[in-house]
Amino acid sequence: MWILIFLFFLTCLMLAWVLFVYYLWLFFLSLIKKDSPEAPEGVSSAPVLSFIVPVYNEAAHIAQKIGNLKALDYPKDKLQVIFVDGGSGDETPAVINRLKEPYMELVSSPSRGKIQQVNYALKHTRGDFIFISDADGIVTPNTAAEVLKEFEKDRNICLVGVYSHPEGAYSIDRYYWLAQNKGRLLESSAFTSSIVVAICYAFRKGLIDAFPDDVVADDVYISYRANNLGKKVSYIDRCMAIEVRSPQGGKQFISH
């Protein structure tokens, strides 16, 4: 019987830590931390930024994504946007070729799957900082500039995640995203974020040359790699990424 009682209280302590104490600890740690520099008001230079957008049968969203990237408030001669197609069977490649700007390119990956497509595109990047952004992720115009400011804040920052949430999400899904965003911001202000979100994140070139082929969640893998290397992961809310393809009701939510 005493074993069951012990396991009960141990479980309660673990739940309390995960749900409450951990975040209280982060909150107080962020209050007493004095050595965290503020992000600069502007960037000291405009390095080349490479955006990788993996696509597969994205005809419903790709025109919006292209327009969204065109609206980025960053010098266009310092932008490289790579749409990497995984063998779409719809009009995705045709739409990209029709709407793309000179700093945008379409490449075809020999293998389908986000990780394989991203790895193929990484070979073609020339930017000092690399952004991975989903085809259904719409970013605010200041995203490139604000992420770059965060990198300039501290040379030890090698990965930056963007505040993310789905558009018009089901209520329970909205609360989840609110909680995870608040948690990542607290972690980042206390020391380092444990994770970024796949909708949009950026890293210094050299953090990885390629993802392992068996990786399923690129955002989880790259965050743990950065932290294991002793680097800092920042999560910021000065810009935003909105997922336009999200469950809109209970049935869709359960399926999702």
Image (spheres, rainbow, N blue to C red):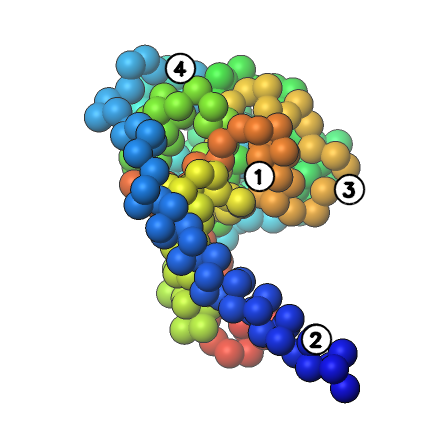
For the N terminus, the image quarter is bottom right
Mark-to-mark CA distance, 1 and 2: 32 Å
Q: Earlier in the sequence, mark 1 or mark 2?
A: 2
Q: Secondary structure at mark 1?
A: helix
Mark-to-mark CA distance, 4 and 1: 23 Å
Name the residue tied to disc 1.
Answer: 223
88 to the left or right of 53 = right
Q: Are marks 4 and 1 in contact (CB under 8 Å)?
A: no
Q: Nearer the viewer, residue 151 or 102?
A: 151
Q: Earlier in the sequence, mark 2 or mark 3?
A: 2
Q: Earlier in the sequence, mark 3 or mark 1?
A: 3
Q: Earlier in the sequence, mark 2 or mark 4?
A: 2
Label of residue 7 in the image: 2
Name the residue tied to disc 3.
Answer: 214
Mark-to-mark CA distance, 4 and 3: 32 Å
| Residue 208, x across and y down, in percent | 64, 25
Residue at the spot 40% in from the left edge and 58% down from the top edge:
24
